[in-house]
Amino acid sequence: MPPIANHVPHLLISWDEARVRITREQVAKGLSEGNPSIQTGRVSGTGDKGILISVFMLEKGEDHIVANRLQAILKDAVSGKAG
């Protein structure tokens, strides 16, 4: 957990950009432009690799929505379909 107020758990996801050809900005854009929109951000002390997902506002079952969308975006990047 990053050293922030309330110590909210976060998931930091990174990948080898040489193999998975997509930037963190492209992943964040793909998440935010989908339906539902999934927002990511940075917290001080978490570095600049990958993306950071907070579970603070997720309701039961929404973790699967985030995971499925993220998996689809990264799979498309591996297969060359990422835009």
Image (cartoon, grey):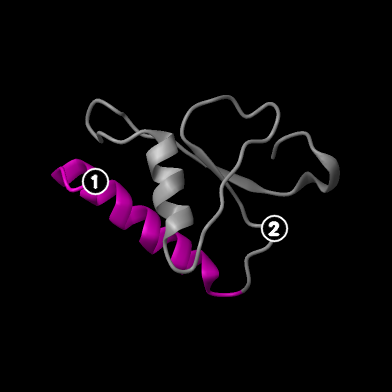
Residue 27 versus residue 19 in the image, above or below: below
Q: What residue lies at 40% left-to-right and 44% top-to-bottom?
A: 27
Q: Is residue 1 left or right of residue 53?
A: right
Q: What residue did someone put label 1 on?
A: 82
Find residue 5 and report its horizontal and vertical position in percent: 85, 42
Mark 2 residue type:
Phe
Q: Is residue 69 magenta?
A: yes
Query: Toward which corner of the image does residue 4 lie, by quadrant?
Result: top right
Residue at the outermost left position: 79
Identify the disc placed on residue 50.
none
- The range drawn in magenta is 60-83
Instruction: Report how far apart the C-alphas of labels 2 and 1 lie in the structure.
Output: 28 Å
SS at mark 2?
loop
Q: What residue did someone put label 2 on?
A: 56
Find residue 1 and report its horizontal and vertical position in percent: 69, 40
Q: What residue lies at 24% left-to-right and 50% top-to-bottom?
A: 75
Instruction: Tell me if mark 2 has few (under 14), some (14-19) or many (20+) residues whose alpha carbon lies within 10 angstroms of its own.
Output: few
Mark 1 residue type:
Ala
Lower position in the chain sequence, tag 2 or tag 1: 2
Query: Toward which corner of the image does residue 52 lie, by quadrant?
Result: top right
Q: Is residue 59 left or right of residue 12?
A: right
Most frequent secondary structure within the magenta stretch: helix
Q: Is residue 52 left or right of residue 24?
A: right
Residue 37 versus residue 59 in the image, above or below: above
Find residue 22 and report its horizontal and vertical position in percent: 30, 36
Point out the image quarter for the C terminus: top left
Residue 45 versus residue 73 in the image, above or below: above
Residue 70 versus residue 44 in the image, above or below: below
The answer to whether marks 2 and 1 mark residues whose Cβ atoms lie closer than 8 Å is no
